[in-house]
Image (cartoon, rainbow, N blue to C red):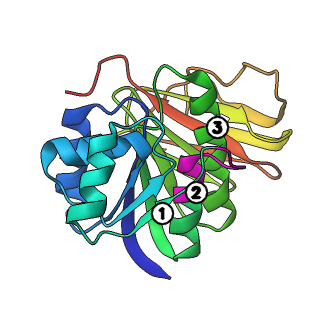
Amino acid sequence: MNRQHVVIISGGTVEENLALDILKKQSSAFLIAVDRGLEFFYKHKIKPDYIVGDFDSIAPEIIVWYKEWTEIPIREFNPVKDASDTEIAVRYAVESGYGNITILGGTGTRLDHVMANIQVLSIPARSGIPAEIIDGHNRIRVVEREVRLKKSETYGEYFSLFPLGGEVRHLYIRGAKYPLTDHTLVPYDSLCVSNQIDGEEAVIAFGEGMVILMETREEMYQ
């Protein structure tokens, strides 16, 4: 597996300070621009390594510029298709064997797109590839196995769990303000919202299922 990190910038809300900081920290990452996310690269004069989308929500002159003046691979789709642009980008990263995926611009005002992007995280999760959506308030992952949250490393003071695709059985939460023992988390269960680490580390373990793990912060990333 190629262990290189992939940063995908999608067409949702991109907090520019956050995105620039992540790109600085991941200076060797493979960069994928997804549809309107290409506007961020264009504005900041950052060269993506791969461009994908149907480009129905981007200023036409921008995609024309990249087509005419660069040799960056561009994968263009008909807007009438069976997968979102972000899903296509994530599948490309997984199939190319990249070892870690960060999605920026994966949240915003379109809750239907947000839900779709969260569910897309299950694709790398099933392949054992760490993946996350990050915005100014949230870090979102989909996990299939035990997770340890260190207080010194978490994105925010709260964490929440939601089942994805069915029940999560034999759920244990240890080292948290609200611990759990052998719980079955069902799709309409809000029991695991807004927990907090009690001490230095919380452990989340479960026997069956897939979990959406959100780490959230009250204060906007600066």
Whether 4 is drawn above or below 180: the answer is below
Q: Position of residue 209 (x, y in %)?
A: 80, 48
- Which one is in front in this view, the residue at disc 3 or the one at disc 1? 1
Any magenta on residue 85?
yes
Amino acid bearing label 2: Ile
Q: Residue furthest bottom?
A: 1
Q: Secondary structure at mark 2?
A: helix
Q: Is residue 139 magenta?
A: no
Q: Quadrant of the C terminus?
A: top left
SS for dot 3: helix
Q: Quadrant of residue 138?
A: top left
Instruction: Report the residue marked by disc 1.
Output: 75
> Do callouts 3 and 2 mark residues in contact (Cβ within 8 Å)?
no
Mark 3 or mark 2: name the one nearer the start of the chain: 2
Which of label 1 and label 2 is nearer to you?
A: 1
- Marks 1 & 2, CB-CB < 8 Å contact: yes
Query: In this picture, which residue range is highlighted in magenta?
Result: 80-89
Label 1's element?
strand
Q: Residue at x 62, y 67 (%)?
A: 128
* Residue 128 seen by the camera: yes
